[in-house]
């Protein structure tokens, strides 16, 4: 028996002495030393989410698992601790670690906890979180409910019987006209209502575009690195290969779209107006080069315009689509302007993709719900939508100023980046070399924070992505002070 198990062990062992745990289906072979704990965390999280590890399931002791994987015990201890702080595991000194009762259930049983969920709380229940600095949500309490109710009433009163039937999969003509007009005026986009498809948020829009591309033989899509892990996960779930492209202060580094080996991707997903998560704005030179790259390779740029309405210090940057409407798919939604739960978004597509896009939208769910579409058309044409955005922009700008002020006061050696737009900013913390330790320390203080590393495909300097739009001034101040305290705790722990 011993020989057989040694043989099995030898088979799974790599040249680095690391191997796999058959029991947990974790394999750390080939993972660089500095990423072992993060990779183990990721694997265990995935095992819980997929249902392979059920609530209450017992995990191997840290010593056993470390021996099984051929890593030091501290790697396993660190991973268990992190998953404990996130609410996935219950860990107590001397007791066996178990999958906690509040761990996310498998996607089948917990539709709200899907891998692609964005926003505070995404992917981590962190039961102890009192105030959440994780980004992704607008201020939900500022949804203009009265104006929305008026728009719904008007929509109901004016909708024809025919409009209540199965209609055009691209969406209600009156909404497409209102959106084409709005996107042209406010985002500088060139939109023909016939080439606009109303979708259930950008997330669904991405699925539709990828299906169109796959049908045409595409196998790989470029994504920004760092880039939204939720959106990337969602994209990968559609069966395309992900090709990370580095991002710097000027946005995505277009020169790196050409791989050293193999063919370049046929499409690249970018956030030009306010890069997620770094907050960089794609520079004019890079915008030009990106369009040239797409022309040269007959490729497509997918523009995620997710929070472009909020720009505080400079004139808004127009959508890239306005420069190259035949090369760029412009995707947007009301998730950051009204509420993500409305699930209303749009795709403005090049003429050559218009029919296929409409067909794939129909194949998924026939069309978006008509009453909400009609209500949004009302809100836009009445001017309420833009008034609401103007009001919100002023509130968010004040919160942004407050956030910058508190960070400067409490973390003088930190650098704030990407704060000129959007609903989140990035704090680079050179004095902290382990983001996970700060996440855990913040969780102990009741604050949810997320390290930049979670959105990275390759290693980079430490930092945190902090959402401020959804918090009141008081909550924001409290959360940031506690975050600063968590950074301080980790720093002084390191010194001692
Ligand atoms: C970068 C990015 N794009 C888009 C979205 C929004 O997608 P949706 O319109 O489906 O709500 C999110 C979610 O927060 C996001 O982080």
Image (cartoon, rainbow, N blue to C red):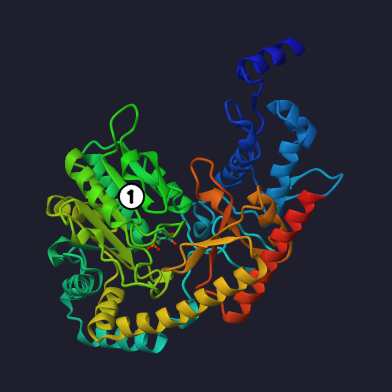
Image region (quadrant) for ligand 1: bottom left
Q: Is residue 1 left or right of residue 269?
A: right
Q: Residue furthest right?
A: 94
Q: How many marks?
A: 1
Q: Is residue 343 left or right of residue 81?
A: left
Q: Residue 337, percent across and down?
A: 38, 74
Q: Residue 222, percent across and down?
A: 34, 43
**Image quarter (top left, top right, bottom left or bottom right) of the N terminus:** top right
Residue at x 51% of width, y 51% of height:
107
Residue at x 27% of width, y 57% of height:
284
Seen in the picture, residue 261 relative to 401 is either above or below; the reply is above
Asked which quadrant contains residue 6, the reply is top right
Asked which quadrant contains residue 41, the reply is top right
Alpha-carbon neighbours of circle 1 within 10 Å: few (<14), some, or many (≥20)? Answer: many
Q: Residue 145, percent across and down?
A: 41, 85
Q: Is residue 398 visible?
A: yes
Q: Nearer the viewer, residue 432 or 204?
A: 432
Residue at x 61% of width, y 30% of height:
28
Residue at x 74% of width, y 31% of height:
72
Seen in the picture, residue 20 relative to 179 is either above or below; the reply is above
Q: Nearer the viewer, residue 161 or 26?
A: 26
Q: Which residue is mark 1?
A: 269
Q: Residue 442, percent across and down?
A: 69, 61
Q: Secondary structure at mark 1?
A: strand
């Amino acid at each position: 028996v011993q020989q057989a198990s040694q043989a099995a062990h030898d088979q799974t062992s790599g040249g680095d002495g690391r191997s796999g745990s058959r029991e947990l289906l974790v394999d750390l072979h080939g993972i660089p030393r500095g990423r072992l704990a993060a990779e183990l965390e990721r694997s265990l999280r995935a095992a819980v989410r997929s249902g392979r590890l059920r609530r209450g399931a017992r995990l191997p002791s840290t010593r056993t698992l470390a021996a099984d994987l051929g890593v030091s015990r501290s790697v396993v201890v660190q991973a268990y601790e992190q998953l404990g702080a996130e609410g996935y595991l219950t860990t107590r000194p001397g007791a066996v670690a178990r999958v906690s009762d509040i761990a996310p259930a498998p996607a089948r049983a917990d539709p709200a906890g899907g891998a692609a969920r964005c926003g505070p709380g995404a992917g981590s229940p962190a039961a102890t979180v009192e105030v959440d600095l994780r980004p992704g949500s607008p201020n939900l309490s500022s949804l203009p409910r009265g104006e929305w109710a008026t728009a719904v009433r008007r929509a109901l009163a004016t909708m024809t019987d025919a409009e209540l039937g199965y209609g055009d999969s691209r969406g209600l003509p009156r909404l497409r006209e209102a959106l084409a007009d709005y996107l042209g005026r406010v985002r500088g986009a060139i939109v023909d209502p016939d080439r606009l498809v109303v979708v259930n948020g950008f997330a669904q829009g991405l699925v539709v575009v990828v299906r169109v591309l796959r049908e045409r033989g595409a196998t790989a899509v470029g994504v920004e690195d760092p880039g939204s892990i939720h959106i990337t996960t969602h994209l990968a779930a559609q069966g395309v290969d992900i090709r990370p492209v580095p991002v710097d202060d000027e946005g995505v580094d277009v020169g790196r779209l050409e791989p050293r080996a193999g063919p370049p991707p046929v499409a690249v997903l970018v956030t030009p107006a306010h890069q997620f998560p770094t907050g960089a704005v794609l520079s004019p030179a890079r915008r030009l080069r990106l369009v040239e790259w797409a022309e040269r390779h007959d490729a497509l740029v997918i523009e995620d315009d997710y929070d472009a309405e909020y720009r505080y210090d400079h004139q808004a940057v127009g959508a890239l689509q306005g420069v190259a409407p035949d090369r760029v798919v412009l995707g947007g939604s009301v998730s950051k302007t009204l509420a993500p739960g409305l699930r209303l978004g749009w795709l403005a597509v090049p003429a050559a993709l218009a029919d296929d896009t409409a067909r794939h939208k129909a194949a998924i769910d026939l069309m978006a719900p008509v009453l909400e579409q009609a209500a949004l058309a009302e809100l836009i044409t009445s001017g309420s939508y833009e008034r609401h955005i103007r009001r919100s922009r002023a509130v968010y700008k004040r919160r942004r100023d407050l956030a910058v002020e508190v960070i400067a006061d409490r973390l003088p050696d930190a650098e704030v980046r990407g704060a000129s737009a959007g609903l989140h900013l990035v704090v680079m913390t050179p004095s902290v070399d382990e983001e996970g330790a700060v996440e855990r320390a913040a969780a102990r203080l009741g604050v949810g924070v997320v390290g930049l590393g979670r959105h990275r495909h390759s290693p980079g300097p430490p930092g945190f992505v902090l959402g401020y739009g959804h918090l009141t001034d008081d909550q924001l101040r409290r959360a940031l002070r506690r975050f600063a305290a968590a950074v301080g705790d980790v720093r002084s722990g390191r010194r001692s």
